[in-house]
Amino acid sequence: MRRVSIFGATGSIGQNTIDLIARAPEDYHVVALTGASNIKLLAADAIRLKAEVAVTAHEHLLPDLRTSLAGSGVEAQAGGQAIIEAAARPADWIMSAIVGAAGLAPGLQALKQGTTLALANKESLVCAGALMLETAKTHNARLLPVDSEHSAVFQALVGEDMAAVERVIITASGGAFRDWPVENLAQATLDQASSHPNWDMGQRITIDSASMFNKAMELIETREYFGVRPDQIEVLVHPESIIHALVGFSDGALMAHVGPPDMRHAIGYALHWPSRRALPVERLDLAQVATLSFRAPCDTRWPALRLAREVMESGGLAGAVFNASKETALDGFIAGEIGFNEMAMIVEEVLGIMSDTPNHIDATMTLDNVAQVDHLARQESRRVIQKRAG
Ligand code: NDP
Ligand code: MG
């Protein structure tokens, strides 16, 4: 029986992971499930899957969690520290699917037990890629990509020599506004930004798809995970979301990963790796799909892509600033304080301010320094948002 834990169990990735595990309960012993606000779902899944412990990030919700778990034998815990402790509980496979920078510390803790960490939380690699990879290496842990594009690249590279890789192409659907006139984007509403043409995902990543901040994060994630240079990574707009990534080799061959837009494929691949097992995803009928289309991304429509390239150029802790200001700007957009286009403007302004302040972006990449830069970048972003709003 494999011992598994799921961080961010109540979210979109977490629920898809549970869907796969619950189909073969005899194969898994569930160690920890974590969530934040959705106590009912967290408790119901913890009871159904007979988890050892259920943890909510919010300490004030501990009484609710205890009540929901009463008599079940599942332990109830709460708070950020409790989530990190849950990541230290021995498990053979751990899903990192908390949203945002909050996923970094539990992910690092999980790696320290030398386990396999299935990484959906791309923010960990954006904020602290070198630290994640070094921690994995030191503790003999394995990091498996769950982001669909990165899982696709990983699969296209099986048996290949990295020295023969010329380029990596990650595709982007273009999100909710890919066909909007650019001048209308400033008026885009929260509802409009929260609906994705192809993928069913959490609200934050759906808005990040419309702004291309998601792909911008994935550019950095690609560089960190596969160790390729920024100029080897391309973004290709592909509205059908059928090809998830392509790898170009020195002999001119392009290996494409083709599949339905269903995260259970990438999650299942990471769950069963290095084998393949049957998964409950649609089998594509390409004759039915008929046409696949592609176009180059436009930097005017999606300034986030340019910003990600600047962040990769800066290196150091620029990724932590980028992520923190993006998360804060996204909060501002969700709260109705700023318009859709202002998210990128705020991130750009904060990157400028923070790179002018010595010792931030150049600090050594430790969890403490990343947390400090993250905190300062959020403060700075709030200040810029208030200035704009007010
Ligand atoms: P969701 O918003 O659907 O879920 C987020 C999860 O994190 C929930 O379990 C939520 O708990 C929990 N959570 C929220 N805040 C905190 C916090 N401060 N501390 C601890 N836990 C917290 O997100 P997704 O599932 O969409 O995304 C998860 C990660 O996977 C992200 O990094 C995203 O970029 C990445 N990803 C997602 C894809 C997708 O298809 N959804 C595709 C590729 C990558 P609760 O709901 O109980 O409040
Ligand atoms: Mg992705």
Image (cartoon, rainbow, N blue to C red):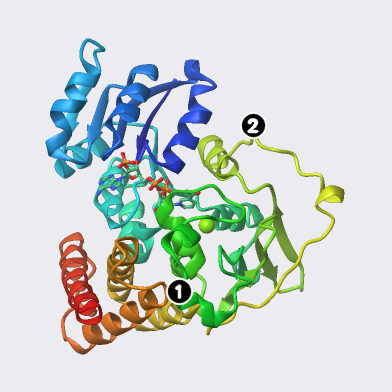
Q: Residue at x 87, y 50 (%)?
A: 287
- Pointer 2 local density, CA inside 10 Å: few below 14, some 14–19, many at least 20: few
Farthest residue toward the bottom? 356
Q: Residue at x 20, y 81 (%)?
A: 387
Q: Is residue 188 visible?
A: yes
Q: In the image, residue 361 lies at what x, y percent?
A: 24, 79
Residue 212 drawn above or below residue 104: below
Disc 2: which residue: 280
Report which quarter residue 49 is drawn in: top left
| SS category of the residue bearing label 1 | helix
Q: In the image, residue 247 lies at what x, y percent?
A: 66, 65
Picture disc at residue 187: 1
Residue 321 drawn above or below residue 57: below
Task: Compute the Cα span from label 2 to label 1.
Answer: 39 Å
**Number of marks present in the image shown:** 2
Q: Earlier in the sequence, mark 2 or mark 1?
A: 1
The N terminus: image quadrant = top left
Q: Nearer the viewer, residue 182 or 8?
A: 182
Q: Amino acid at mark 1?
A: Gln
Q: Residue at x 75, y 67 (%)?
A: 293
Which label sits in the foreground, 2 or 1?
1
Q: Residue at x 30, y 27 (%)?
A: 40
Report which quarter residue 331 is drawn in: bottom left
In the figure, is residue 176 to the left or right of 91? right
In the figure, is residue 159 to the left or right of 310? right
